Amino acid sequence: MFIEQVINGLTLGSIYALFALGYTMVYGILRMINFAHSEIFMVGAYIGFWVLSSLPVFLPGFLPAYFLAVFILAMLGAGLLAVVVERIAYKPLRHASRLAPLISAIGVSIFLQNLIMLTAGASSRPYPEKLPLEQFNFFGAQVSSLQIFIFGLAVLLMFILTLFISRTRLGKAMRATAENHIVAQLMGINVNTVISLTFIIGGGLGGIAGVLNGLYYGSVKYNMGFLPGIKAFTAAVLGGIGNLKGAMAGGFILGIVEAFAAGYISSENKDIFAFVILILVLLFKPAGLFGEEVPEKI
Amino acid sequence: MKNLLEVEQLQVSYGKIAALNGISLYIEPGEIVAMIGANGAGKTTLINTISGILQPQKGSIKFKDELISALPAWKIARKRVVQIPEGRRVFPKLTVMENMELGAFPEKDGKMVKAGMEKMYAFFPVLKERKNQPAGTLSGGEQQMLAIARGLMAKPELLMIDEPSMGLSPVLVEKVFQIIKEINKQGITILLVEQNAKKSLQIAARAYVLETGNIVLSDTAGKLLGNELIKKAYLGEH
């Protein structure tokens, strides 16, 4: 039971962590909470759903390449959507009061939910099962190939992101922009490009998290982003919003807490714990576990 | 091209409050030009407008005969019009090395960046000792060195330095002005914005005196040092 819940928690945490990175990256650069990010996640899940249900696997041996294509398409689609949202709904408000883009983000979120509801239907759709499912025994606990896949992909993506941010020229430009937009411009950095890049990466990771969520729970629905969105946001706040490692750690902590709550307390009320954590963090450690800055209350 | 920089009838305001009332100035290649004036005279506004951070309401800024006043700040920086901002403003969470690398951001050739960095380390050995430290942990003087090094990493043609002596001890002020002279000897044109009028006039070729958004005097630095009004108002001599 214990090991099983750890495995469940790490799987859930992988999804939350990838999802949370989008919130935290955008906050780091723009000091804004992108409430439309939960819909980027949902659209990513739908892109995966559409590709999986319309594109056949040509040969069994092509399966890895097939899934690579699914993830790349979901990542690109979600990333581009995130950039378009930024250009249309946030950029014109960059010098407005901080509440304005927040409200705009909520508007985008409602719009995207309704758009998908009207075009793809209001009911939940089953996610195509094209990954061969196998169960393994791990110290007496059951672990599925899908769980290993989700965890492995999430860790790989986080590793690549960390390298990108810490080592590359553009990664450094992103960190510089997060610290000071004006001084970054004095270095010859085009801040608008950096902001777009942030939305592409954050949105892309959110889109992949959406596909993983679809594969794990086996369904998609137009409002599927809402609850995981709040949990991923909680993970970002728990780690210290604006801090990438914080979002990763926060995601895994939240996943494990939720898995244990579902396993030992009540699986019906498992969603409460994310909210309890959010409230406790905001009350007692608003800067989060790894954060230095205290985010403004919104 | 006679002048490297030509500013004409520049007018800048913050909302309804005018900060610069149509000022004109020029800088010839290879000069050190000082801009002196009290706090709030508009000195920082001027270089922020040249850098493209502020947009002028009227007037023009030409760099090497090319109009740059409508360009965004990052494009102006890439024309090698480089600003070392007031109060140092290094990136505190980034390391000393990363700050310097960002100074050379437009340069994509890593070898060129490395070579530039080695040159700066030779110039400022203390930065080499601290290269892996977050810039925010450096002392004020070290941060000023880093800001200068970061500015030089961009290989500027025009270097605008805003209040380099601010918050530094007299010994360090002396050192910073020595460095500025040294930089200029290597062929970099400098616009020096300073409250410390005496020090800047000692190293500048020419100077402008800015008072509440207007240029009230301009002359060679030597003549301004001997000017009675300047002595009274800016040099603290009676």
Image (spheres, coloured by chain):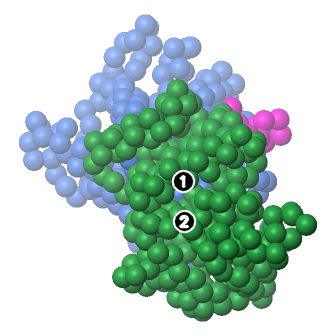
Chain colours: A blue, B green
Kindly identify which numbered label has been placed on residue B32: 2
Separation of marks 2 and 1 at Cα, in angstroms: 8 Å
Q: Position of residue A137 (x, y in %)?
A: 37, 12
Q: Position of residue A266 (x, y in %)?
A: 67, 29
Disc 1 secondary structure class: helix
Residue at position x 35%, y 60% in the image: A77
Q: Give the residues drawn in magenta, as a range.
A: A281-289
Residue located beneath label 1 in the image: B181
Residue B63 on the magenta segment? no
Residue at position x 54%, y 84% in the image: B7
Query: CB of mark 2 within 8 Å of CB of mark 1?
Result: yes
In this image, B79 relative to A258: left or right? left
Labels 2 and 1: the sequence-earlier one = 2
Indicate the amino acid at tag 2. Answer: Ile
Q: Position of residue A245 (x, y in %)?
A: 55, 34
Residue at position x 28%, y 42% in the image: B111
Quadrant of the image for the N terminus of chain A? top right
Q: Who is closer to the viewer here, A60 or B84?
A: B84
In this image, A128 relative to A204: left or right? left
Residue at position x 34%, y 40% in the image: B114
Disc 2 secondary structure class: strand
* Quarter location, residue B106: bottom left
